[in-house]
Amino acid sequence: MKIGFIGFGHMAGAMAKGLIRGGFVGANDINACASDYEKLSARLKKGENARESALEVARESDVVIVAVKPNQVEDVLSPIKSELAERIVISVAFGWDFDRYESLIPGTKHISIIPNTPCEVCMGMTIIEDKHNLDKTELTLVENLLKAFGEIAYFPSNKMWLAGELTSCGPAFAAMFIEALGDAGAKYGLDQEDAYKIVSQMVAGTGALQIETGKNPGTMVNEVATPGGVTIKGVTALREADFHEVVAKAIDAIEK
């Protein structure tokens, strides 16, 4: 199985690393192209194949992942429509859903997804549009590819972008929280790198606990923030600072 990336920025790079780490393909099974061929060639050090053009990537791959910026999709894909017709196309371009691709590459098998950067360590969360033109065998192949680096969830076309905002933008918000809490620890004497490490593990563990138990996050707060304890003091301070509202404003800004 040969996987091709048209565009190879941070997200595509994370996906490629996850596919290799997850054992779906070997490094030599990955083809990639980018606007700067020389820079891309220097970047690929694990045996991935740097290609000079999108056409070359398509010709050398069974599955083509479109990972260019949304405003570049039409210009990049239009010249290679005939080659893509023989491939499965997976799009990670935000805003490009099934209907939009149907007008650009009719007759080609395609599906739109929104992955996130934790897929690099096989802990990704990928949103999949539930509207596509893949048959059962092709869909199973795509699902297995995506599951190699994390979990998947289907959403209807009118909800997938919102879901994607939570999952693909969320790592930046989570990293800000990790940084802030770690820096608070450093303020009172912890080594900063040690603080980041233990906070990151705490965040990963809390997420795993919620997923496994299915508990409401509010219930989890109450289980830790017992009356008269130390946690309730911090929770109270966060509530007084409108923590929920501050986080919601991040999505408000995106939605606007």
Image (cartoon, helix red, strand yellow):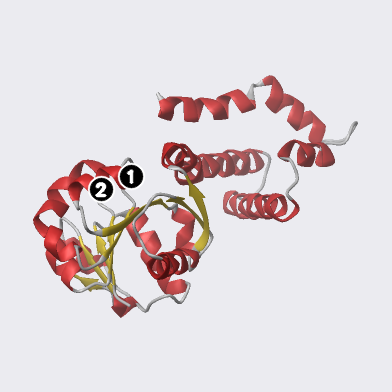
Identify the amino acid type marked 2.
Tyr
Q: Is residue 145 left or right of residue 42?
A: right
* Residue 106 x, y percent position in the rendering: 20, 53
* Residue 80 x, y percent position in the rendering: 12, 59
Q: Residues within 10 Å of mark 1 (few under 14, many from 20)?
A: many
Q: How far apart are marks 2 and 1 (CA)?
A: 6 Å
Q: Residue 97 carries which label?
A: 1
Q: How crowded is mark 2: few (under 14 residues within 10 Å), some or many (20 or more)?
A: many
Q: Residue 31 carries which label?
A: none
Identify the amino acid type marked 1.
Asp
* Residue 129 x, y percent position in the rendering: 42, 49
Secondary structure category for the residue under label 1: loop
Q: Which residue lies furthest to the right in this view?
A: 228
Q: Which mark is residue 101?
A: 2
* Residue 182 x, y percent position in the rendering: 61, 44
Q: Do the residues labelled 2 and 1 touch (CB within 8 Å)?
A: yes
Question: Of residues 84 and 93, which is closer to you in this image?
Answer: 84
Quarter of image, res 70 = top left
Secondary structure category for the residue under label 2: helix
Question: Of residues 93 and 185, which is closer to you in this image?
Answer: 93
Q: In the rendered view of the protein, which quadrant contains the C terminus?
A: top left
Residue shown at the point (49%, 41%) measured from the top left: 163
Tell me if residue 143 comes above or below residue 70 in the rendering. Answer: below
Residue shown at the point (46%, 38%) measured from the top left: 159
Question: Of residues 25 and 246, which is closer to you in this image?
Answer: 25
Question: Of residues 211 and 221, which is closer to you in this image?
Answer: 211
Residue shown at the point (16%, 53%) measured from the top left: 77
